């Protein structure tokens, strides 16, 4: 009779709940609520799904099939359609159920936390002890609750959108809750944060035994432990000890390797740090080679080991680089590749050219180096370890890229590099202000320009190369003018005679480089003539050579540390006259040439002279008409023979330019001189000034 009343009461209660669900009204916390889950939840170890899937392949609805993207949200449990719940941390919950009945546990888990409508079968009996050591993610709560029901021979079934807690089909033996009560045991859920559940089981089994680990949830990374409160507390302490952020407790270093193989260096590092198997530092520091990145990853629990590892990697890499030959490229900044490579080869102890692509058939003194040719040298370096190297250092000039290629070991290149940097220094520049003038020697200058300068009011002195100031290597004289007095000398000469300024160039040239100025024509000169002997009408073949004439000035400055400038000067003034000394049908080139080496101070003007030329001239004059009358015309004609003497005067002023600041000063001075054209009143003065301003400013 009691059983019938209970069955009838359960039937009435089910009908009431169904009617309440159809009404759509919200119920209180103690009432049941109808819910709909839109996604199935599966659990490893369970033989069925908690939520059914309909025949159309969709879950919890009749929407048509379509492509839907589900970005990862960190949750594996479907959200409720009609309301959302906020828990500790919004997705985590902490439980502390101790000997709670299944109905009370269902009310807390299903009703209050998950917000699901549920029915507990009256035949389901037992109690649940569910405690979490730390907040557990809410999506794992339903699986954990189902596991606890399984230990009480109960399971979850969905009927009419309600969660039913019913007896299992195969109840089995005595429920585990009864066993727990008899032996004073408990169950605790331990979520893991940093270590995988399977790895934690491997760690805990030697400590607490496998029988105390009821369940391993790999999907949600948590453990279910059983045992006495003391055993569970010890297990939780062990879990807290091992469940830590391993990355936070480790230090990393990525060390580059330039010369050696990272795999080979790692073997040596493991020997040095004794980090191999059963070594004292095994697990404390480890080395991972990466040949693709040419580096070594160092992982250590103590940051101080990283510095030591870096030092040893550099040592091994340096030793490997010192014994291995490799190609080094030095990009030249201030010189030519061929010049620097040849100079470097001569600096090395035993340098001998091995190959040279340039044509050396001409005289070396007349050879002009080709800046794009490649020249190689083989040499050895003293002081460098070349025990494992064969053949010595190879130096090749890359003229195309203006670079020096050095094939050597790292130690050899380290010994050569300071030489390269020292030789590849920024050279000085010299601005040469030159004036080449031809002065006609009149009665006042019949003794030459030297007498004029000695008798005039000029500050000068005669010197020679022995005392380091001025010296000339040709017959004549040399004057040294103070800055600004060279123009004064030209003005003084022009007031008493004719001064023909042949050229007045301003040349900027690098230190120890030749500056050359050519103004004139190339005159054909017959150098060879040949006639065939085979027949009477043989062709005459003449060889013609073009000869430069006019003004040719060549100056090579060399600047020393004291500021003095050594000038190698080659000056030639030539013109073409008719040949009168032979019957060769070729002009005569009349030359005045100066070759000298002088030493002057920076900014001082040097005057070179003494080359006097005397030319005989015949002048014919007559009275118009009468001078053309035969016989009597001689009375009206006059023939006068005169001699004209000229002297070549060269004025050179060097200005040393050591840096960009001094170069800017020289440019500003030159612009100031051009500003003097503003007072030029010629008809084309405005046009000339406009062109100069457009070009220079």
Image (spheres, grey):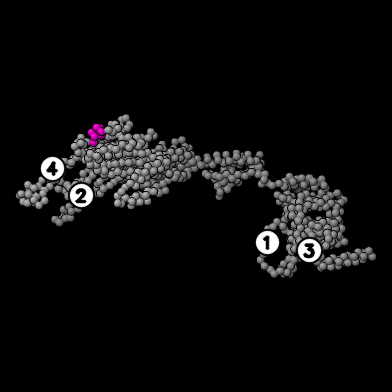
What distance separates the C-alpha of mark 3 from that of mark 2?
A: 119 Å
Magenta-tinted stretch: 449-456
x%, y% of residue 19? Answer: 84, 68
Mark in the foreground, 3 or 2: 3
Horizontal side of residue 380 vs 535, given as left or right: right
The span from disc 1 to disc 3 (Cα, nearest Å) is 22 Å
Along the line of sight, which residue is nearer the eye, 602 or 358? Answer: 602
Name the image quarter holding the N terminus: bottom right
Q: Nearer the viewer, residue 162 or 456?
A: 456
Please report whichever mark, 4 or 3, sits nearer to the chain's N-terminal start. Answer: 3
Contact, mark 4 vs mark 1 (Cβ under 8 Å): no
Q: Which mark is residue 35?
A: 3
Vertical comparison of 546 with 658: above or below: below
- Asked if residue 71 lies left or right of residue 111, the reply is left
Q: Which residue is mark 4?
A: 641
Residue 220 in picture, x, y percent from top left: 73, 55
Residue 683 visible in the current orientation: yes
Identify which residue is drawn at 76% across, 50% down.
134
Question: Which residue is label 1 attached to?
Answer: 70
């Amino acid at each position: 009779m009691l059983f019938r009343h209970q069955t009838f009461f359960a039937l009435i209660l089910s009908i009431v709940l169904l009617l309440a669900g159809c009404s759509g009204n919200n119920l209180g916390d103690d009432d049941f609520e109808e819910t709909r889950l839109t996604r199935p939840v599966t659990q490893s170890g369970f033989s069925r799904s908690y939520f059914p899937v309909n025949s159309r392949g969709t879950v919890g609805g009749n929407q048509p099939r379509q492509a839907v993207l589900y970005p990862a949200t960190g949750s594996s449990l479907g959200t409720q359609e009609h309301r959302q719940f906020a828990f500790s941390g919004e997705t985590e919950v902490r439980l502390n159920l101790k000997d709670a009945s299944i109905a009370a546990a269902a009310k807390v888990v299903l009703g209050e936390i998950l917000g699901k409508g549920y029915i507990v079968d009256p035949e389901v009996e037992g109690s649940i002890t569910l405690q979490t050591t730390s907040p557990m993610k809410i999506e794992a709560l339903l699986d954990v609750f189902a596991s606890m029901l399984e230990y009480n021979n109960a399971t979850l079934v969905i009927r009419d959108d309600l969660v039913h807690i019913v007896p299992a089909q195969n109840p089995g033996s005595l429920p585990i809750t009864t066993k727990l009560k008899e032996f004073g045991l408990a169950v605790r859920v331990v979520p893991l944060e940093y270590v995988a559940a399977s790895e934690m089981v491997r760690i805990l089994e030697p400590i607490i035994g496998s029988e105390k680990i009821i369940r391993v949830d790999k999907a949600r990374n948590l453990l279910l432990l059983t045992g006495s409160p003391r055993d569970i507390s010890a297990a939780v302490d062990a879990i807290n000890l091992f469940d830590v952020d391993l990355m936070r407790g480790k230090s990393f270093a990525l060390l580059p390797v330039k010369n050696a193989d990272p795999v080979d260096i790692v073997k040596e590092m493991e020997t040095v740090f004794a980090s191999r198997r059963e070594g004292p530092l095994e697990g404390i520091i480890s080395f991972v080679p990466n040949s693709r990145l040419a580096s070594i990853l160092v992982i250590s629990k103590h940051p101080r080991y990283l510095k030591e590892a870096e030092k040893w990697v550099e040592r091994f890499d340096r030793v490997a680089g010192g014994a291995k030959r490799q190609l080094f490229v030095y990009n030249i900044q201030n010189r030519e590749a061929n010049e620097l490579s040849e100079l470097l080869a001569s600096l090395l102890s035993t340098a001998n050219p091995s190959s040279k692509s340039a044509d050396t058939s001409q005289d070396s003194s007349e050879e002009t180096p080709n800046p794009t040719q490649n020249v190689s040298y083989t040499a050895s370096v003293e002081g460098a370890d070349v025990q494992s190297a064969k053949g010595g250092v190879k130096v090749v000039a890359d003229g195309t890229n203006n670079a020096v290629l050095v094939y050597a070991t790292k130690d050899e290149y380290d010994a050569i590099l300071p030489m390269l940097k020292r030789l590849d220094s920024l050279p000085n520049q010299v601005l040469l202000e030159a004036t080449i003038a031809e002065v006609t020697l009149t009665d006042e200058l019949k003794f030459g320009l030297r007498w004029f300068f000695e008798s005039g009011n000029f500050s000068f002195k005669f010197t020679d190369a022995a005392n380091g100031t001025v010296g000339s290597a040709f017959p004549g004289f040399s004057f040294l003018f103070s800055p600004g007095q060279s123009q004064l000398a030209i003005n003084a000469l022009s007031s008493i005679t004719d001064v023909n300024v042949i050229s007045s160039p301003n040349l900027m040239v690098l230190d120890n480089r030749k500056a050359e100025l050519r103004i004139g024509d190339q005159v054909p000169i017959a150098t060879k003539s040949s006639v065939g002997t085979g027949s009477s009408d043989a062709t005459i073949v003449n060889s013609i050579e073009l000869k430069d004439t006019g003004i040719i000035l060549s100056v090579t400055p060399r600047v020393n540390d004291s500021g003095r400038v050594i000038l190698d000067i080659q000056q030639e003034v030539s013109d073409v006259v008719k040949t009168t000394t032979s019957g060769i049908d070729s002009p005569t080139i009349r030359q005045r040439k100066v070759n000298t080496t002088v030493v002057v101070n920076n900014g001082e003007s040097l005057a070179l002279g003494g080359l006097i030329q005397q030319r005989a001239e015949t002048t014919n004059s007559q009275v118009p008409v009468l001078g053309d009358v035969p016989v009597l015309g001689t009375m009206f004609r006059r023939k006068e023979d005169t001699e004209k003497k000229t002297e070549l005067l060269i004025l050179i002023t060097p200005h040393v330019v050591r840096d960009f600041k001094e170069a800017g000063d020289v440019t500003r001075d030159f612009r100031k001189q051009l500003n003097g054209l503003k007072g030029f009143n010629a008809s084309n003065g405005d046009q000339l000034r406009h062109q100069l301003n457009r070009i220079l400013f």
